[in-house]
Amino acid sequence: MDKLETLKAWVQESKNIVFFGGAGVSTESGILDFRSVDGLYSQKFDYPPETIISHSFYLRNPEYFFRFYREKMLPLGFEPNITHRVLARWEREGRLSAVVTQNIDGLHQKAGSKKVYELHGSVLRNYCTRCGKFYPAEFIKDSSGVPRCGCGGIVKPDVVLYEESLDQRVLEKSVEAIAGADMMIVAGTSLTVYPAAGLIRYYPGKKLVLINRDETPYDDYANLVLHETLGTVFSQL
């Protein structure tokens, strides 16, 4: 049986799949990732992207942070791709119990997925750091300079910046879902960013599938590895 047939068979047998996805899930919708050839790290800025989207840089130079954020990290107007849509269908069919994502674009929910754990937050949620008032992504996009609430506080995106810790509740729910899964699919991630990458070690089963264009540090750890684009694989599931 070839790898794709094995994957199909496992999906059919499973009732509690957890999908863990990274930037590669959204690149086929046109959203740039960080590390690929044409990703953000290979573009020219005054500072490295991971410096700009760090907590200390945000505090030190909010004006530059928001300029970069608006230009490069506010993926509005993009549509879910085949991977997002298949996952939403599996959830409706009762096969998939949760999506754990490193992405901040909200495309899983746009495709119809209900149980999505966003490890790095979401650009769709923004809040005043002074009074807590909620603002949509469009507010940030349409503002200039540092976006401010009526009360004068800075309106900050609810995304986890470098140097910030992950939301403990989201992390706990993700671990719980992974530990209870009968199949885990890890896709579109280089598995080099921690603590997110370490989450796959909580999966206790024998159906750990890795789908990624390039090799990852966990290839030998998985039960099934497909070095393909996600669109190629999910269009056949």
Image (cartoon, grey):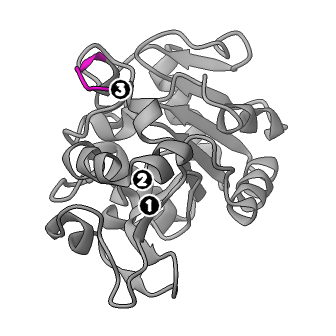
Residue 126: x %, y % from top left: 41, 72
Q: Is residue 99 left or right of residue 172?
A: left
Q: Is residue 164 above or below residue 114?
A: above
Question: Earlier along the polypeptide chain: callout 2 or callout 3?
Answer: 3
Q: Is residue 235 visible?
A: no
Comparing 168 with 177, the one in front is: 168
Q: Is residue 221 left or right of residue 136?
A: right
Q: Is residue 187 left or right of residue 149?
A: right
What residue is pinned by disc 2?
A: 104
Give residue 122's mark: 1
Write the start and end of the magenta stretch as one range. Answer: 42-46
Amino acid found under the numbered disc labelled 1: Ser
Give residue 47's mark: 3
Label 2, secondary structure: give it: loop
**How many tags in the picture?**
3
Position of the C terminus, as image quadrant, is top left
Residue 67: x %, y % from top left: 23, 49
Label 3, secondary structure: give it: loop
Amino acid found under the numbered disc labelled 3: Tyr
Is-magenta flag for residue 45? Answer: yes
Residue 81: x %, y % from top left: 25, 46
Comparing 44 with 175, the one in front is: 44
For the residues bearing labels 1 and 2, Cβ distance under 8 angstroms: yes
What residue is rendered at 70% in x and 9% in y? Answer: 220
Question: Earlier along the polypeptide chain: callout 1 or callout 2?
Answer: 2
